[in-house]
Image: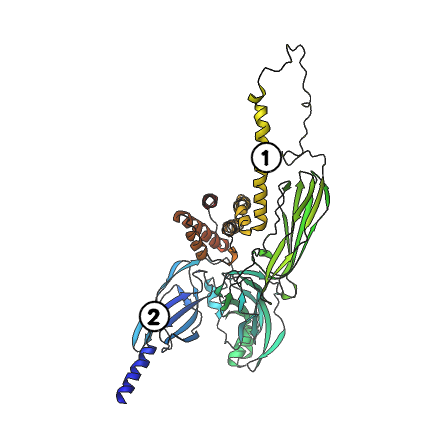
């Protein structure tokens, strides 16, 4: 029995045995000065420790000694896996390339070190940080948490890619506040954000919480739409409030001041810094299989389509109009398009968006108007258009279809034959001077079978038939094959975005230039390879290009442009015109090179 117990003890020990590792991570490796971010230490293999010794550094500061703790325990194939995480909130005190030193965790008397983290810290935007000056830093006041705090309220933390979640930051306070301001705007990575307008005046609502009565003000509210799956996080939120000095003294020490002290401090305020913790989201990918014509729309929508006339003359325009209305991310709804027969000349669509933010819901309408001109007579079936979206409430894909558009075209003044899009009139060249006194009007004696006209009579119809057959096949494929249609228009659409970027560059609008450059690159990849570009991370885009055998130098250039555009969209600094021109030329070159690859 004794030996059995010893063997059993060793077996239990081996069951729980697991190599111990310590890993440090940051919620974002690119931050601003004084912008709070989460620093997490994860220990795998043991939960028998209470804290960690953080590496000494003068570049970063802990906002609070309080940590968030999470533990995980699981058994897989009879083996036990244990892990424990400690989360801290930090800020960087200066800009530049900085390093968070390794942390040390002691377990059973043995020290284990984590990795260090390289951080890129951008200079804070002017006036955004209340503690930017020495004087402000001295005036920042530490107020007890039960007197003033920020509570984030989230409508849901488990959601699908593209599904909306409402985030509200509420300020709870028991001291007198004259005003408040946020130190940095929230730029959640991996989300599209739509902000709601908030009354900046401190509200007078009251709420009973934790045995005390608080006044409550909603200080920030927005909806986020995740653009990729996985665990995503919104960084800690930070605000500065102006608190009446006498009120703070009364709350800390009671009414023990004499009259002179009270009189001299009646009109004085101090700044108090308050924080809200980070918010984590579990974002699920959209279910498979996706419909063939699904292009990324998520929400709840209605779809209307119309053709402004059923009969037209050649050379006169007709207008197709498409309306998508409902709740969801209207700003990123995919464009609606229709492939028309080769006898129609189609112009650039006119796209308008009307976003409504009433009743704490993002809704609105996207309208697409397509003008086309028939160049030949006949009865045409223009086909129908499908709009497919994913409804997260029902967890189902919904396809809405337009009616089939039919158009009868009669011959007008336009005689066909291609030409320019504008009517051209020539004066004085229709009739030439007739020469008199010609020696002979007889045709030269050339056999008919040796004349160009003879061979043209055979070759031109064959060439025309081949051309129209290929054109018809391409149009049929465009209608039935979404991947082919997107790949076909990838380069032209990218060039349109580059053209817009060039206009921003010329007018000196740098942030808009970088945004349009980023859109050109990501939409180009999405169209060329028929993927939902909004749901892909930069690393996934890089892996996709590798899988498509794109040369490494082109991939490196593509990723550099993408990363540079993303960083400079939010960085409060300006680039030189020479560097911007070079970046634009690199983008043109990169898109051109990838477009030539299969």
Q: Residue furthest left?
A: 3
Is residue 283 shown left or right of residue 93? right
Residue 556 place in picture, x, y as percent: 41, 50
Within 10 angstroms of label 1, few (less than 14), some, or many (20 or more) residues?
few
Q: Is residue 234 visible?
A: no
Residue 460, relative to residue 20: is it above or below?
above
Residue denoted by label 2: 21
Residue located at (61% from left, 65% from top): 200
Residue 271, relative to residue 542: is it above or below?
below
Q: Is mark 1 on a helix, strand or loop?
A: helix
Is residue 13 shown left or right of residue 564? left
Residue located at (56% from left, 40% from top): 470
In front of the other: 399 or 104: 399
Residue denoted by label 1: 464
Classify residue 582 by image quadrant.
top left
Q: Are marks 2 and 1 in contact (CB under 8 Å)?
A: no
Residue 385, relative to residue 53: is it above or below?
above
């Amino acid at each position: 029995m004794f030996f059995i117990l010893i063997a059993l003890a060793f077996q239990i020990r081996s069951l729980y045995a697991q190599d111990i590792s310590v890993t440090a991570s940051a919620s974002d490796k690119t931050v601003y000065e004084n912008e709070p971010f989460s620093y997490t230490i994860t220990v795998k293999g043991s939960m028998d420790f209470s804290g960690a010794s953080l590496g000494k550094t003068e570049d970063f500061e802990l906002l609070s000694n309080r940590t968030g703790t999470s533990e995980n325990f699981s058994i897989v194939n009879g083996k036990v896996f244990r892990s424990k995480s400690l989360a801290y909130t930090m800020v960087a005190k200066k800009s530049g390339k900085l390093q968070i030193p390794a942390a040390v965790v002691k377990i059973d008397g043995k020290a284990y070190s984590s990795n260090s983290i390289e951080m890129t810290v951008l200079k804070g935007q002017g006036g955004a940080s209340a503690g930017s000056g020495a004087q402000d830093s001295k005036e920042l006041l530490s107020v007890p948490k039960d007197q003033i705090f920020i509570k984030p309220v989230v409508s849901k933390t488990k959601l699908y890619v593209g599904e909306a979640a409402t985030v509200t930051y509420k300020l709870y306070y028991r001291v007198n506040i004259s005003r408040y301001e946020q130190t940095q705007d929230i730029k959640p990575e991996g989300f599209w954000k739509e902000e709601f307008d908030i009354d900046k005046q401190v509200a007078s609502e009251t709420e009973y919480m934790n045995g005390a009565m608080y006044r409550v003000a909603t200080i920030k509210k927005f909806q986020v739409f995740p653009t990729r799956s996985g665990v995503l996080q919104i960084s800690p939120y930070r605000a500065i409030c102006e608190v009446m000095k006498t009120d703070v003294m009364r709350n800390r020490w009671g009414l023990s001041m004499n009259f002179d002290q009270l009189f001299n401090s009646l009109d004085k305020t101090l700044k108090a810094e308050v924080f809200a913790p980070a918010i984590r989201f579990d974002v699920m990918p959209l279910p498979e299989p996706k419909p063939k014509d699904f292009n990324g729309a998520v929400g709840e929508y209605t779809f209307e389509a119309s053709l402004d006339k059923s009969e037209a003359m050649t050379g006169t325009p007709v207008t197709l109009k498409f309306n998508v209305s409902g709740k969801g991310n209207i700003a990123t709804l995919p464009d609606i398009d229709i492939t028309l027969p080769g006898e129609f000349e189609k112009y650039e669509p006119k796209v308008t968006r009307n976003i409504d933010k009433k009743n704490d819901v993002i809704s609105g309408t996207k309208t697409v108007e397509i003008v086309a001109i028939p160049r030949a007579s006949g009865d045409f079936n223009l086909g129908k258009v499908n709009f497919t979206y994913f409804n997260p409430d029902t967890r189902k894909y919904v396809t809405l279809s337009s009616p089939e558009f039919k158009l009868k075209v009669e011959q007008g003044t336009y005689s066909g034959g291609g030409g320019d899009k504008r009517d051209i009139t020539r004066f004085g060249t229709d009739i030439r001077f007739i020469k008199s006194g010609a020696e002979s009007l007889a045709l030269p004696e050339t056999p008919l079978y040796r004349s160009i006209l003879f061979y043209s009579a055979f070759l031109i119809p064959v060439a025309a038939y081949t051309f129209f057959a290929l054109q018809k096949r391409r149009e049929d494929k465009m209608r039935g094959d979404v991947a082919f249609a997107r790949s076909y228009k990838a380069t032209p659409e990218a060039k349109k975005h580059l053209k817009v970027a060039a206009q921003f560059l010329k007018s000196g609008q740098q942030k808009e230039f970088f945004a349009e450059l980023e859109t050109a690159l990501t939409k180009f990849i999405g169209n060329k390879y028929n993927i939902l570009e909004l749901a892909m991370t930069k690393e996934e885009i890089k892996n996709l290009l590798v899988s498509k055998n794109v040369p490494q130098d082109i991939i490196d250039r593509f990723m550099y442009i993408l990363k540079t555009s993303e960083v400079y969209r939010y960085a409060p600094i300006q680039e030189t015109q020479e560097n911007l021109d070079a970046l634009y030329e690199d983008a043109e070159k990169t898109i051109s090179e990838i477009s030539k690859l299969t």
